[in-house]
Image (cartoon, helix red, strand yellow):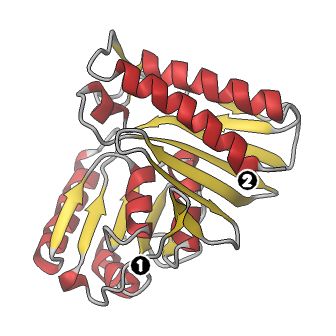
Amino acid sequence: MDYLKIAKNAAIKAGEIQLRNLNNIKSVSFKDTKGKNNILTEVDTECEEVILSIIKNNFPTHDVLAEESGKNLENSSDYIWLIDPLDGTMNYSHSYPYFSVSIALEFQGEVICGLVYDPVHNEMFSAEKGKGAELNGSDIKVSGVEFLEYSLVVSGTFHHPEEDIMDKFIEILKSLALRAQGVRRDGSAALDLCNVACGRYESFWEFGLNPWDMAAGSLILEEAGGKVTDLKGGKFSIYDGRLVASNSLIHNEMLELLAPYF
């Protein structure tokens, strides 16, 4: 079964919805009462409905873990689709053109294929386990930069920062700004991972993430020759919520920089 082909079709349909409604958001709501950052638009919901329809029509016995509709494990399947219909909703709600569709398939606890689609630039990142990573059908590899001081590093923030955690985050950013060539915060973890995979960034780190934020992008990065661990250098899990991703060459430097904070 060509899982990626079906997923790509779903991502393209969702991307069309995003482009059609960009600059014309009718409403923005909040997913909970904890803060202003965890937002939802009607486009998130519409995109997820389209993706779920395509996935369920083709794989009716598979289970789903999706950002907006949550976990549906009624089939007790070995296959679980992890879906983020609009990664970068805050960016999208402000018409900031950095957002994506992320779809991955997990089989018996291992992500076996994934894609991240950037509709603004018409860039489709994809990977299958053990088969390498691609951007619009061409092979991609991580950068060859060997030292943090020559690296461009990207980070993210989280939805409900407590004061002590935010203080820690600011200190890390300060340390990175002093050590790295440059630091960015773009607002779509899935795309950030893919931009490390194709050599635009050397590293990405974040905590407070969800499985659907990381599943596709982490596989793409690893298949492009990169490395992904938890914040202490241990085994990475999409269910842990935190990661350090890199071109592998500066990974130890990133872990050393983060070590005092975790």
Q: Position of residue 2 (x, y in %)?
A: 78, 50
Dot 2, how many residues are within 10 Å of its Cα: few (below 14), some (14-19), or many (20+)? some
Pick whichever, 224 or 30, lies toward us.
224
Label 2 element class: strand
Q: Secondary structure at mark 1?
A: loop
User: Dot 2 corresponds to which residue?
Assistant: 106
The residue at 13%/70% (across/down) is 177
Per the rendering, the mark at residue 208 is none
Task: Name the amino acid type tagged 2.
Answer: Glu
Q: Which residue is mark 1?
A: 247
Furthest residue toward top: 26
State whether residue 69 appears in this view: no
Work out which quarter of the rendered image holds the C terminus and state it: bottom left
| Residue 139 % position (x, y) | 53, 70
Residue 146 in the image: above or below residue 177: below
* Drawn side of residue 188 relative to residue 4, left or right: left
- Please state the horizontal and vertical placement of residue 109, each as a whole percent of the image: 76, 58
Q: Earlier in the sequence, mark 1 or mark 2?
A: 2
Task: Give the image quarter of residue 22.
Answer: top left
Of 151 and 10, nearer the camera is 10
Dot 1 surroundings within 10 Å: few (below 14), some, or many (20 or more)? many
Residue at point 27% right, 38% down?
Answer: 97
Using the numbered discs, state the Cα–Cα distance from disc 1 to disc 2 in whole angstroms.
23 Å
Residue kind at label 1, given as amino acid type: Asn
